[in-house]
Amino acid sequence: MQKKVLVCSTIHLAGVEELRKCALVDEKTGLSLAELREVMPDYDAVVLRSGTNLTAEMLEAGKRGNLKIIGLAQTGTDNVDMKAAERLGIEVVNSTANAISTAELTFCLIFSLARQIIAAQQALLDGQWNQRNTNLMGIQLCGKTLGIIGLGNIGLMVAERAKAFGMVIVAYNRPSDRVAKIAEEKGYILCSLDELLEKSDIITLHLPLTDETKNLIDGKAIAKMKRTALIINCARGGIVNEADLLKALESDRIKGSALDVFEKEPLPKDSPLIEFAKRSNKLYLSPHLGSGTEEAQRQVAVEVAQKVWKFIMP
């Protein structure tokens, strides 16, 4: 009997075509959670992205039918109740193929803040031409200390790029012999979180959202940073406490921040973050673009599709 796969989020066509090599594929994007819960039992696999949350209740509904595997066309797994999936025996697979694109976006945001790119363009459009304008004075990256919180696939790619720019790299990571060996070979300095916060000129986050990492960067953490520090988050919303970050920016406790991810996505139009960014060049916002490249979208979709069909094929 032919296997059935539901694709309930928009993914690259190459991934859909890969799934069709082994299964009957239905593309049903835009389903409400109630509609998704109703149809999930009809499928052996469901493929989705971060815009859809699969609760224990939904997974239980799928398990009462044919559901065997969830394919996530993304790096993170925080939109799936992983404990429930494990309890129910439902496999969950994801992809790390967007790591390069996310690492590149991280550096894009670092550069934008360091050299005040958005403010500089606005000044030019407003008819200003003062290269020594204090508001547009930037910093060079060479010699600065980059603090990387989470030295996994993406964090290591960011570190490689930072090293090429002559930056000093310090990192905080949960104990790992593999990471410790790489850090020693590459000349990265592993340290405690407090040490990283105190030493870093720029801090970038590359770790999942968990109970342990939620609000990791809050008012207390920010109080330990340099007043000239920049904070970059291309990982997951919720790791940075947005209210505390805004207070720090308003009071000049830190110099700036760039966020690609948010506690609530899509970011509400009335968000205080948007209001502040409209009137200040201290905060740059982008709409979760970490994997927003043609290459990453294709690779992520194909990688997840291959993992799904290898699992469901007899």
Image (cartoon, rainbow, N blue to C red):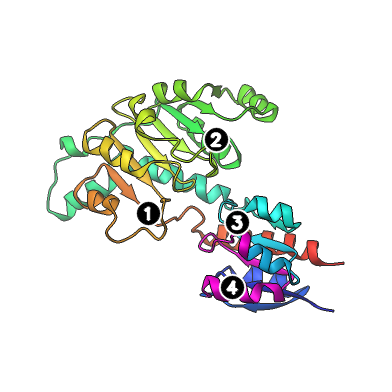
- The answer to which of 82 and 294 lies nearer the viewer is 82
The tag on residue 36 is 4
User: SS of the residue at dot 3?
Assistant: loop
C-alpha span from label 4 to label 1: 29 Å
Q: Which mark is residue 150?
A: 2
Query: Furthest-left residue in view?
Result: 127
Q: Which badge, 3 or 1, comes first in the chain's sequence?
A: 3
Task: Work out whether mark 4 precedes mark 2 in sequence or the reverse, and give the earlier one.
Answer: 4
Q: Nearer the viewer, mark 3 or mark 1?
A: 3
Residue count near mark 4 (Cα–Cα under 10 Å), binned few <14, some 14–19, many ≥20: many
Calculate the distance from the C-alpha at mark 4 to the C-alpha at mark 3.
Answer: 14 Å
- First to last magenta residue range: 31-57
Please report contact status of discs 4 and 2: CB closer than 8 Å, yes or no.
no
> Which residue is under mark 1?
286
Q: Earlier in the sequence, mark 2 or mark 3?
A: 3
Q: Position of residue 296 (x, y in %)?
A: 57, 57
Give amino acid for label 4: Leu
Disc nearest the viewer among 4 and 2: 4
Q: Please identify, in this view, whether the residue under mark 4 or under mark 1 is nearer the observer.
A: 4
Q: Which residue is mark 3?
A: 80
